[in-house]
Amino acid sequence: MSPRPAPRIEPLLTPKEVASLFRVDPRTVTRWAREGRLTAVRTLGGHRRYRQAEVFQLFGNPAWDDAVRSLTDEQGR
């Protein structure tokens, strides 16, 4: 019998790390997850983590950038 390949561990980001990328508050990232804009993975302790690949895909999306920019403009008023 051949050995099974090791499971692929997907890199995850904390709400604070995602928030720093988009220059928003970590609570905004949590709200995005509740609204279905971003997929959250729960740790055993109940904390949210976000898939790095999904976050980076959104980060490079011009439509998402415009949406984030409009949200940050509204918060700054």
Image: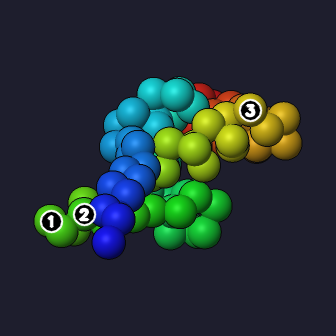
5 versus 70 height, above or below: below
Kindly identify the residue that appears in the image at 34 percent across and 43 percent down.
14
Amino acid type at image mark 3: Gly
Q: Which residue is mark 1?
A: 45
Q: Is residue 61 at least partly visible in the picture?
A: yes
How far is mark 3 from mark 1, CA to CA?
Answer: 31 Å
**Quarter assignment of residue 44:** bottom left
41 versus 15 height, above or below: below
How far is mark 3 from mark 2, CA to CA?
Answer: 26 Å
16 versus 45 height, above or below: above
User: Which structural element holds mark 2?
Assistant: loop
Kindly identify the residue that appears in the image at 31 percent across and 62 percent down.
3
- Which residue occupies the foreground of this view, 56 or 26? 56
Q: Position of residue 26 (x, y in %)?
A: 39, 43
Mark 2 and mark 1 in contact? Answer it, CB < 8 Å: yes
Query: Which quadrant of the figure contains the C terminus?
Result: top right
How far is mark 2 from mark 1, CA to CA?
Answer: 5 Å
Amino acid type at image mark 2: Thr
Q: Earlier in the sequence, mark 3 or mark 1?
A: 1
Q: How is the image coloured?
A: rainbow
Q: Position of residue 10 (x, y in %)?
A: 42, 50
Q: Which residue is mark 2?
A: 43
Q: Residue furthest toward the right?
A: 63
69 versus 42 height, above or below: above
Q: Is residue 74 at least partly visible in the picture?
A: no
- Name the side, left or right, on which 58 lies relative to 15: right
Q: Position of residue 70 (x, y in %)?
A: 74, 38
Q: Which residue is mark 3?
A: 60
